[in-house]
Image: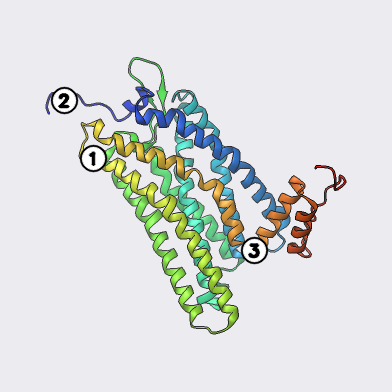
Amino acid sequence: MGNTQVQPPEAAFCDLNPTRGLPLILLYVMPTFFLTVLILGLPLNLLSLWVFCRRLGRWTRSTVFLFNLTLADTSWLLALPYLIHYHLDQLYWKLGRSFCMTVRLFYHNYFYLSIFFVTCISVDRYLAIVHPLRSLVLLGRRQTHLLCVVMWAAALLLSIPVVTMTEIQTCPGSNRTVCPLYIFLSHTKQSLSYSLICSILGFLFPLLSICYCGLRSVMELHSRPDPHHKRQRLRVRRVLSAALVFFALFYLPYHMSRNAAVVMRVLYPNSPTSWGRADLVFSLEMCLCSLITCINPLFSCFIGRQFRKEFHGTFAVMFCLSKRTRMTVRKRQGMSTVTPVCALPETDSC
């Protein structure tokens, strides 16, 4: 062991052999995913912001949380072109350490913003059902906006260590600089403790909160025989199911693979081949988790009834759907302000 040559953790970013697993993901799969997410997610989220700001007259607490969730999606998507360019340019970072830290901060910060606002929606439903009178005091308009500010600040505070751990690395034998995520750097002890803290505070506690709020809400509604409460039970189950699907498909595998990648570095500090599989899985999870920004607008439609009506109506306006579809949208919306009518005759395409 004494004569073993220690390979730096960032070596995988310098030796870009496309026949190996990780470089293949970094050079081809990841930019493809990110570009697809940008093309699909940015229009959806910009349209959602427009619907929130221009079409919804009355905002509920859930509307405020959904708006902030969409705002977080959009801010992350606006930082995505820099990562796409970085991966397409053979992992050559040309924008300096400060911008590298900023982009990595955005990337890390976004996931916890998304988790926090999904949790806020679940807690809001719980308070409205189990403590309806108290919720008016605990989450009035001012308190709701203040809670959103606290969520942004909490996610930022949780992500600040990413800045201190982010480094620009220069590849041996070349002037190419790389901007790897802190997971792939050599601060194993610091990275492990930080990753575990984020997993507990930013993932496990919100997951337990969602489970508790959802189960308590369903139990409370089961104790009320009113048929109206049956519809409420169905809506609560929809919110709980959607939140748990988010956590099961995206957040849980992301945190498990991230912690596994760091743990492998701690257990085998001098054996890069031992980390390879964990790094590969985590890189794939980074790709899959980027899809959240495309799914969150659908989550908003799933949760918010009025938002769903206005969103569908706006789609009908933008794409000039057929006369039958326009009549269906108009019928569903009732007196809604969106009236999608195509200016051309019915026989012509819009």
Name the element at disc 1.
helix
Q: Where is residue 172 in the image (x, y as percent from the top left)?
A: 33, 18
Residue 89 tag number: none
Amino acid at circle 2 = Thr
Q: Residue extending furthest top?
A: 173
Residue 305 tag number: 3
Q: Which of 208 and 53 is in front in this view?
A: 208
Q: Which of 11 and 106 is in front in this view?
A: 11
Residue 51 relative to residue 192: left or right: right
Mark 3 crowdedness (10 Å alpha carbons): few <14, some 14-19, many ≥20: few
Residue 27 relative to residue 275: left or right: right
Q: Are marks 2 and 3 in contact (CB under 8 Å)?
A: no
Marks 1 and 3, how far apart in space? Answer: 48 Å
Name the element at disc 3.
helix
Name the element at disc 2.
loop
Q: Residue extending furthest left?
A: 2
Residue 266 tag number: 1
Amino acid at circle 1 = Val
Residue 95 in view in this figure: no
Mark 1 crowdedness (10 Å alpha carbons): few <14, some 14-19, many ≥20: some
Residue 206 in view in this figure: yes
The picture quadrant where one finds residue 59 is bottom right
Q: Where is residue 129 in the image (x, y as percent from the top left)?
A: 53, 75
Q: In this view, does 324 lie above or below 6?
A: below
Query: In percent of the image, x 41 and y 26: which residue is there?
Result: 178
Q: Is residue 17 above or below residue 9?
A: above
Q: Which of the two discs, 2 and 3, sits closer to the camera?
A: 3
Residue 4 tag number: 2
Mark 2 crowdedness (10 Å alpha carbons): few <14, some 14-19, many ≥20: few
